Amino acid sequence: MMMEIIENKVGKKILLLGNEAITRGALEAGVDIATTYPGTPSSEIADTFSKIAKYATKQNKDPGFYCEYSTNEKVALEVAAAAAFSGLRALTCMKHVGLNVASDAFMTYLYVGCKAGHIIVTADDPYCHSSQNEQDNRYFALFGSAPMLEPTTPQEAKEMTRLGFELSEELKLPVLLRTTTRLNHARGAVTFNKLKKPRKKGHFEKDPLLVTTPNTARIKHPVLLEKMKQAEKISEKSPFNEVINIGTPKDFGIVTSGVSYNYVKEVSEIMDLDVGILKLGMTHPLPRKMCEKFIKSCKSLIVVEEGEPILENQFKAMAYDIGSNVRIYGKSTDHFSRLYEYNPDIVAEAFSKIFKVKNPFPKQMQPKLKLPSRPPTLCPGCPHRATYYAVKKAAPKDTIYPTDIGCYTLGKAPPLETADLLLCMGSNAGTACGLSVATDQKIISFMGDSTFFHSGIPPIINAVYHNHDCVISILDNRTTAMTGHQPNPGTEFDGMGRQANLIVIEDIVKGLGVKHIEVVDPNNIKETAEAYKRALDFKGPSVVVSKSPCILLEVQRMRRAGEKIPVYTIDQDKCTKCKTCIGRFGCPAFYYADDGSIHIDETQCNGCGNCVEICPVDAISKKEGKK
Amino acid sequence: MNRKTSIVLTGVGGQGVITAANILGKAAVRAKTNVYVSEVHGMAQRGGAVNCTVRLGNVSGPLVAAATADVIVSLEPVEALRNIMYANKKTKIITDINPVVPFTVSVGGEKYPNLDDVYKEIQSRAILFKIDALKIAKDSGAAITKNIVMLGALAAADVLPFKSDVLLETILGNIPVKYKDINKKAFNGGMKALKDL
Ligand SMILES: Cc1ncc(C[n+]2csc(CCOP(=O)(O)OP(=O)(O)O)c2C)c(N)n1
Ligand code: SF4
Ligand code: SF4
């Protein structure tokens, strides 16, 4: 099947995910290089590039662009920035917290500026659907002085990406494309423009001002401020900033951006309001004249923006500057919250208070029956579960388990409960060091293979150098599972589908100077527990590399190879209902029948066979054939 | 066209809820109907509760306001009730009747409610349609087509602003030839099951 997203048919309309639309927009701008470190809700942007590249490689064609899953966001930004210095159009995408990691490069990159266009996509996650915080990255645009675009729909995301490259080249600055989950993971119709041919190779022109010594930085900072003045002029004329009237606007104006606009428009229509809406797409720098004119046109302003009061504070400042006494409703008047996501209900509730009319939507009525919660959980047959089970066998009760971000964070839930402390990617080993100084408790930390490469190495060096007494585990499931099974430096093939120079984790660990290293297969639970006991006995830092592929990849491999996936079953005559399997190991394929007997749900079992080893009365065995 | 249609699709991670929402969105584009779809990714994949929304017609975004859904399609009975805040008295709720018991029940000591109580509460607040989609899917040739059965049932529920053929064509246009027959059976089975109620 031809990939629809790379068809060069002008005017063709297809349904695209917001993230796919960003990729399409970049292709229409002739992007040369795309880099990332994966993270929800940004992942499908780079995954789409990768899919296209692999599709081309398979047909012995050149995709035209280069894409890579870099080791972390900072590296991703640096790789792309170098290309943009050399005259190639570049795109870098990451989740919001990724920009924290990349921020060191980002802040000074803005001083230096770029030659060819560079779009940096930040995918924010209000409500923390799949994140450890809900930080508002629009502050980064203000913090570092970056031009910023905020799309409302997939169609607009495509257009902003396409035209964002031109904006970036006009200003010689990278452009921040700020998105949120409801844009990244919304689908809508997108109309194609022409695909543009990439340049592929650039040329690096030497320039002393590309070396940011204190001297050049002092020269470059005022240049950046000048560029922002120029950007403000562009913002005044930007097609992405516009006033949209609903009814016959009289006293009230609404200022909004991003997905909030959708809720504002729909609710205003349903409530029959007479309002002017200032819809801002280029939100940094703001079009000051346009905003001032809008402020003057109304007696009251409502600012509707998820997250922090960034537009609100700027509008207050502008109103003050022009001596306006417009009333501004927003977060400071408690009509809107700084927390979580907005939706039509929240906007309608606020409008009903401000306009003193009835909320058109009925109150949300939750179910009266108490329903069981259904959080995500480690898959049946997940190797992380086997490691955790072994650890719990080996470790004393008071052991602390600093953890990290990945599927294995799900070990937090009962019955495993092997996650006690987590800040950000890489924090497991850093906090393990601190805990070893601060307490006399045993410490076993966990990180995944992708996390190890991302930011897990420096804290291990720290542990070695200072001889911190802790066990650091690397749960090497041969992939970056949580975000959708992307490659990492430990996997055989890269994002282009090419054979890569695979790096073996235990080799690195050895090179870091760790004296006690155990490499185990977690599916051998007994040996894994023994290895952990030895690691715990060792004085000083020790590392356990627990190596077994993510069961979903393993099942996929077996299916492709035509191998049968085994299914396991419980012999009801032997089973004593001791509940070890269900209550301590907790594979979700186990369930209780109405009579209290324990069974394995064949549709869920992935055939890892680990429950055979943990059953104390040998009641579990492989069933003939199947799947 | 001033009409809006709001659809909530729900179920358990792995049941194909997101795929169903995507197909519905593609069918709308095919039918030249304005459409927005919203989905959840990431944490929801690992067996968690999933909910997607699809909005058609004169709409400016994918999110459905409280009590304004025209139809809720659920691949699991408890998940149908979990999304009841989107329903009003006129909302049609189409659900499969086969429970997927979450691990919080087997491991965590929570309770899976009596299904009659679940249906009773739904019936007191909306219009309920129950079908054994899993059986229809299995009879069609593959349990995995349960989401397609549910799309068939949705197509028969008199809520979509386009013809059921468009939906079926979209489904068949997106899968390899060897699965077309099974999916067609599943879709038609779903349609028939709803009409027979
Ligand atoms: C700075 C930062 N970047 C990206 C992410 C998104 N993220 C969450 S989990 C994860 C992957 C972890 O992969 P790995 O460590 O191999 O664990 P697995 O999921 O495979 O068990 C990523 C990239 C994040 N939370 N923070
Ligand atoms: S996707 Fe893989 S690593 Fe993640 S929980 Fe499932 S089996 Fe475990
Ligand atoms: S073999 Fe046992 S532990 Fe493994 S997935 Fe099946 S039921 Fe779960």
Image (cartoon, coloured by chain):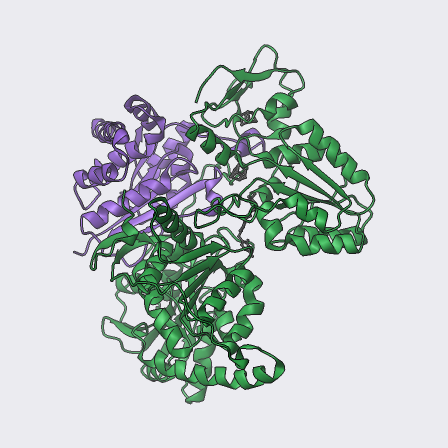
Q: Colour of chain A?
A: green
Q: Quadrant of residue A159?
A: bottom left
- Residue A286 shows in this picture: no
Which residue is at a point 33% across and 61% down the rendered structure image?
Answer: A25
Which residue is at a point 40% across and 84% down the rendered structure image?
Answer: A230
Query: Is A80 or B153 nearer to us in this picture?
Result: A80
Q: Quadrant of the N terminus of chain A?
A: top left
Which chain, by letter, is purple? B
Above or below, comparing residue A203 to residue B159 in the picture: below
User: In this rendering, would A60 be left or right of A146?
Assistant: left
Image position, residue A523 (x, y; %) = 62, 29
Image position, residue A496 (x, y; %) = 43, 50
Q: Quadrant of residue A27?
A: bottom left
Image position, residue B137 (x, y; %) = 31, 26
In the image, farthest residue toward the top: A573
Query: Is A158 or A267 nearer to us in this picture?
Result: A158
Image position, residue A542 (x, y; %) = 75, 44
User: In this rendering, would A121 be left or right of B61?
Assistant: right
**Badge count:** 0
Q: Quadrant of the C terminus of chain A?
A: top left
- Residue A458 shows in this picture: yes
Q: Quadrant of residue B118?
A: top left
